[in-house]
Image: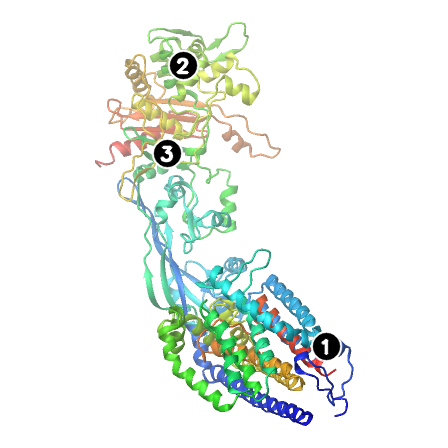
Amino acid sequence: MAGTDFSHQMTGSQHQNGFVRSKLLFARFHIDLTLFLLLILLCCSGLLILYSASGQAGDMVQKQAMHYLIGFAVLLIAAQIPPRIYKILAPWAYLAGVIALIGVLALGVSGKGAQRWLALPGLPRFQPSELMKLALPLLVAWYMSNKSTPPKFITLVKAMLLIGIPLVLILKQPDLGTSILIAASGILVLFFAGMPWWLIFSMISIVAACAPLMWFFVMHAYQKQRVLTFLNPESDPLGSGWNIIQSKTAIGSGGIEGKGWMQGTQSQLEFLPESHTDFIIAVLAEELGLIGVLLLLVLYFVIIIRGLYMSAKCSSLFGRLLSGSLITTFFIYVFVNIGMVSGLLPVVGVPLPLVSWGGTSVVSLLAGFGVMMSMYTHDVK
Amino acid sequence: MWGHSFRDRMAEQKLFRSRAIFMALFIFALLSLLAGRMAYLQVVLHEKYQGLSENNRIQLRPVAPNRGLIYDRNGVLLAENIPSYSLTLVKERVNSIDETLSYLKTLINISERDEEQFRKRLKYNSRPYQPVVVKHKLDEKEIAQVMVNRYYLPGIDVEARLVRHYPEAETSVHALGYVGRINQKEEERLDKKQYSATKHIGKLGIERRYETELHGQVGYQKVETNARGRILRVIEQEDPIPGKDLVLHLDQRLQSAAAKAMKGYRGAVVAIDVSTGGILTQYSNPSYDPNLFVTGISHREYSGLRKDPDLPLFNRAIRGQYPPASTLKPFLGLSFLDAKAVTWEDTVNDKGWYQLENDERLYRDWKRTGHGHVDLHDAMMESCDTYFYDGAFKTTVDKISPFLAKFGFGRNMALDVPNALPGLLPDREWKKKKRRRSWYAGDTLNLGIGQGYMLTTPLQLATATAVLAAKGQWHTPRLMESIGGVSDVENMETLDNIILKDPKDWDKMFKAMQDVITGSRGTGRALRYNLNFTMAGKTGTSQVVSIAQNEEYDSEMMAERNRDHALFIAFAPVENPKIAIAVIIENGESAGRTAGPVAKAVLQEYLEGAQG
C-alpha cells in the first residue's frame, strides 16, 4: 500500500501496485510475452490455413506474412506509447474519424454498391471505419475515465450520443455489420464502466423491439436478402444461399478428423466462395476437422482470457475500460465470423481475426493489442 | 477525501473485475456455443454433409455440338458421327490406380499400348475429377463386363461419345481429310468456350477447311452428379447447335472408280465439273484409312504409314508437283496461235531433233526418226516435240508464260483446298530471282514441251483442262457445293475468262485433241475402243529427275522408280464438255497404257454409270 500514488486521473497517472514482476527483456519494451507468443501462434496457424485456402498461392501467403510483419511492427510501436498520450489523442482521433466518415459520404470511392473507401491524395486508400474501430473505444474510455463510477445516467446518455454519431455515419455507407461492431465496442466500454444491469436489459429489449422497424426503414435490399438467406438458405441454393450451403457442407463434410490439409474438396474445387477471406474457417473445418476447429477456438479463448486478465490488471480506469472493450470486440469478431460461416448468424462481411486474408484488419487488430500492452505494462511499472 | 478516493478505486477495480469475470464466462459460453454448433455440423450431421459434398455437385457442363455431316453430290454419306464407348477413370475417386487397372485386366483386354496411352493422358490431365480414358472403342461384351462389376470399380465408368467415322475410308480421305484429337497448339488458338466440350478438330482437307461451319455451337447442361461423378439429373439445359451439313461436288462413284483403276499405281486423279468448277474427284493412290486418326493412331501404325516408300500420306492430287510434259501442249499450242507466232497451216519438218542457231546441242524428239512435215494439228495428235520447240522459240517465253498463267498455272486457284501447292510457272524474272541466272533460249525450248522448270499439280492440270473445255470460261475449282443447304457461290477471286483472238482456235484444238484418241497416229489411240462418247485428250510423259543414288538399293525398285511419269488430260463429251480430268501415274511410262485407261474409267463412270 505504501508508495501508492493517487495522482489525478486526467494526467494519466502511473503507479505501482503490489505485484512484483520479473523484469523480462520484453517487459522493458512494454510487451506482454504470453499474449505476444499466443498471437504469433495464431498468425502462424493463419498462414498454414491460408496456404491451403488460397490454392497453394505462395505469393498470397507471402503477402499475408508481410501484413503480419507490419502488424507486429505497429503493435511494438503502439505498446511503447504511454497511456497518457492515448488519452490526449482520444478526442482528436475521434474527431478525425468522424470527419473522415463524413468525407466518405461526401466524396468516397464506392465498391460493391457501398461507399466505404476514402482516397485522399498522397495517402493510401483506406476505410475510415477501420480508424473508428480504435478511435471510438478510445474516446468513450477517455470520457468515462473522467467520470465517477458507477456512472450516472446522464453520463451514459452523453456517451451514447458519442457512440451514435459514427454509428449513423457508417450505417449510411451502408455497412450494417461494421456499424454494429463499432457501436458494440463503445457500449462495451460502458458495460465495463459499470453500466447498471437494468439499463443493459432495457437497451437489449429496445433493440429487439426496434429490429422490425430497422427492416422497413434502415436496411437495404441486399441486407434484407442476407437475413432472408440466413433464415432459409435452401430457398435460393444457386444464388445468395450458395455461400452458406457450401460453407456448411465444407464444415460438415470435414467430420472429426477432417479430409487432410490441402485435401478439402469443397475448398480445393472452389465450391467454397471467399475461402481465403471471410469463409476461411470452413477450410480449416473441412481439412482439419472438429479437432482443428476446437484447437483454434481454444487458442482464441486463451488469447481473450489473457486479454481480459491484462485489462483487469491495468490500474488506471482508462486502461481497463479500453483494454476490456478491445479484447471483447476481438471476441465479437471471432463469434460473428464463425457464427456466420457455420450458419448461426446471417452473412455479414466480418473476417476471422488474424486468420482471414487482408492487410487492414490484421494491422488494426494488432495495433489494438499493442494499445492493450501499453495500458498493461505502463501501468504496472 | 483520501479515504473516499481510495475506496472509490477499490470499488472501481472490484466493479471492473466482476464485469470482466462475467464477460469471461459469457465469452466461454458463446465459444462453447460455437464449438457445439461445429460439433453438431461435423459429428451429428457429418454424414449428410459428406454426402452433399460428394454427391451434390451442381456443375455446368458444356455439351459438344454434333459435327456436321458431309455428303457427296449424290447424297452418299462421306463423314458421319457414330457412338463409341470408352472406359474412363476418375483419378480422385479411385483408391489405387494400379489395383484398379489390374482388376480391370481380369475383366477385359487392356493392351500395353492402352495402358501406356492412359498413363500419358493421366499425366497431362491436371484438372481434378476429370474422367480420363483408359480404353477406346469398347465392344458390347466389354461394356457388359465392366458394367456388371461396376460396384467393385469406383471411379470407373463407360462413356458414350459420338466419334467421326468415314464410311468410304481410303477412297475419300485425300479430299475430305480427317478429324483428330485437339493438340496443345490448336488449343491455344481455339475459342475456349466453343471448344470446351469438343475433343476433335478437322486436321486436313475439307474437315479442316470448313471447321467453323462443321463444328457448330456449344451447349450447356446444369447437372447434379453423385459421388462417382455420374450425372444424376439435368437441372437445366441449353442445347448445342449442331454443325452444318456439307454437300460436296465430289462424286463418290468416281472416287471408287478412280481407286479401282489406280490399284497398284502411285499417282493421282482429279476430275472437275466443267460448267461449275466443282471438283468431282480428288484421289491419290496409295491411300490410307482416315478412321485410324480419329481416336488416335498408334505409333507403330503411324510410322508404318510414314515409312512406306509409296508415301500413302502424300496427297499427290494437290501436293504432287510434276512436269506436265506433253499434256501442256494444248495450252502451248493456243499460246503460239494467240501470239500469231504460228498458224494452223504452218508446218515444221521434223527430222528427229531441233537445233538452235549457234548451238551444237540437239533437242531431241521422242521419236528418233522424226515425224516429217507436221502442222499444229498433227503435232498435237502425235505429240511432236520438234514442232513445239520451234513454236516455243518463235513465241518466246515472254508470251508463253503470261498466257499459261491465264489457265491458273503457277498458283493455287482452288477455293477450298488450302494446302494445295502452287506448282511452278517459270519466266525470265523467276529464273533471275531464284536461280540467279538469265533465261536461255534452251529453257524456252524445254518449256515448249512442258519440261524443264515447269511444275504442275494434278489439280492444276485438271483445272486448266476444265477451263480449256469451257473455251476459256473460268469457274473456280472447289469441293464444297453447299453448306447447311445453302449453295453459297460467293464471288470468289477468280481469273478473267480467256478470250482468244480467233475463237475458232478452241474448236480446232478440240478437234486435234479428239484425234489424239481417234486418229490412227494419235498417241491415245488405244483408248478409242469401247468408247461410247466423244473424248478429247492429251498424253504426256515426263522425265523423272534422277534420284539420289544410294549405296544399297534395290536395283529392281530403283529401275522402276527411274521410269518416266505418265500423264493424261481429257475432257468429254467434246461437243458439250461436262467433265475434265487429269491423271498422273508415277513411273507409269506409257500414258496411253496407264494414265489414259484410268481417265477413261472415271469418265465412263461419270457419263455412263448413272444410266447403268
- Disc 1 crowd, CA 10 A, few/some/many (<14, 14-19, 20+): many
Q: Which of the colour schemes (rainbow, by chain, secondary structure, one colour) is used?
A: rainbow
B125 vs B167, nearest the viewer: B125
Q: Can residue B332 be seen in this view?
A: yes
Which residue corresponds to mark 1?
A: A30
Chain holding disc 3: B
Q: Seen in the image, is B173 located left or right of residue A3? A: left
Name the amino acid type tagged 1. Answer: His
Q: Which residue lies furthest to the front in this view?
A: B1
Which residue corresponds to mark 3?
A: B415
Q: In this view, does A255 lie above or below B318?
A: below
Q: In this view, does A335 lie above or below B248?
A: below
Image quadrant in which you'd find residue A147:
bottom right
B196 vs B152, nearest the viewer: B196
- Name the disc covering residue B384, or none: 2
Determine whether label 1 and label 3 are within 8 Å by CB: no
Q: Residue A140 placed where, x, y %?
A: 57, 78
- Disc 3 crowd, CA 10 A, few/some/many (<14, 14-19, 20+): some
